[in-house]
Image: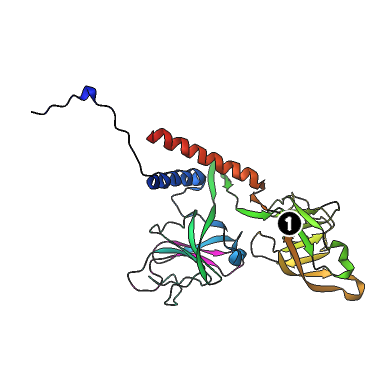
Amino acid sequence: SETTSRSSESPRKFRLSTRTMAKLLAGVVAVAATVVSASQSSPWMFTLTGACDVEGGIDGMSFVKQGNTLSGAPYYKAMHAEKYIYYDPDCMTSTDGTPRWIIDDSKPDVTREHDLDGDDVCNYIARIDSNDTRYPPTSGEWTMNCAGNYQLQFLILLELTTTGTLTTTMKGAGTNTVMTTTTRAPVFDAPRSLTLSGACAYKRAMNGLTYDLAGTSADGWPFYKAKGVDEYIYHDADCDGAGTNTLSLWVLDDSKPNTTATRDLDGDGKCTYHARLDYTGGKMLPTSATWRMYCGPAEGWVSLDLTLKEASGKDLVFGNTMVSSAARGGMAASVAALSLAIMQALFA
């Protein structure tokens, strides 16, 4: 009879195909990159980045949870814009459709089981197939409509969560309650340098100025300083601090913004500036828009199309922290190197 001597056996190496190895490595990288935002409950707010150029207006938009649809999945609306993120089990009511998370400019009908935008077609800004109804993927390849061409875009939905610890102590007949909150800040890409053009003759000295990213305000908005002169671009939620202004503004000003203030950042108690842009579409400064600029006593305030052309790359802004492209690449390389080391240790 055949016998086998186990003492002479050599251990068989566990071999994986290149394709399987790549998938496992990608999984480890994704876990390492998103572990801080992992959550079992649906986050109340996301900030999106990674859209194609034609849909760049949604980059930096923050989407706030509005409630839940009939499937129990949460749905989100962009702040100050009619853009939504929701889960649709079947976007065509065909009963055999593919479940997916959708970015759309139509509000979902929370009473419908399928085709939540009610258009009987799968028409949307972007979608990603998923069977997970808890919340949209915090990172992944979405199919995005880019000027009529559907293409893959790697989108990041950075979770912003607020957790609270409620402590109640009894003191005689009274009660003392303390609420502590911890917030994870949104992320977006801010242009590193911008060159201005389009100013009127009265402000012609501003044409050609290059503004460098100088930091962030108390609310996490980026602000810029012109090279060689005291000229600034910043965001102000209430330019005179009186609490009566309902529009937030991007401002061109010769006063440096106070980065510890949340309104009236130049501290003058007035809405005084070179130009302003009424804008509430996310924390990305528009590179082309119609501003109101003061063009001297003869012309007064004039609507002008100003262009802020990107003069270099972008830096990642996380809350009140800026991360340069080089540093970001270093972090990505570190994550990849760590992941590779783990894989090699597991399967060597």
In the rendered image, the residue lying farthest to the top is 7
At which x and y percent is residue 161? 54, 51
> Which residue shows up at 91% across the image and 75% down it?
298
Residue sitting nearer the eye, 327 or 101 = 327
Disc 1 residue type (three-letter): Ala
> Which residue shows up at 79% across the image and 53% down it?
225
Q: Give the residues in magenta.
A: 68-95
At which x and y percent is residue 207? 83, 63
Left or right of 101: which side holds 95?
left
* 286 to 166, vertically: above or below: below
Residue sitting nearer the eye, 221 or 125 = 125
Left or right of 250: which side holds 328?
left
In the rendered image, the residue lying farthest to the bottom is 119
Q: Main secondary structure of the magenta part?
A: loop
Residue for badge 1: 311
Helix, strand or loop under label 1 = loop
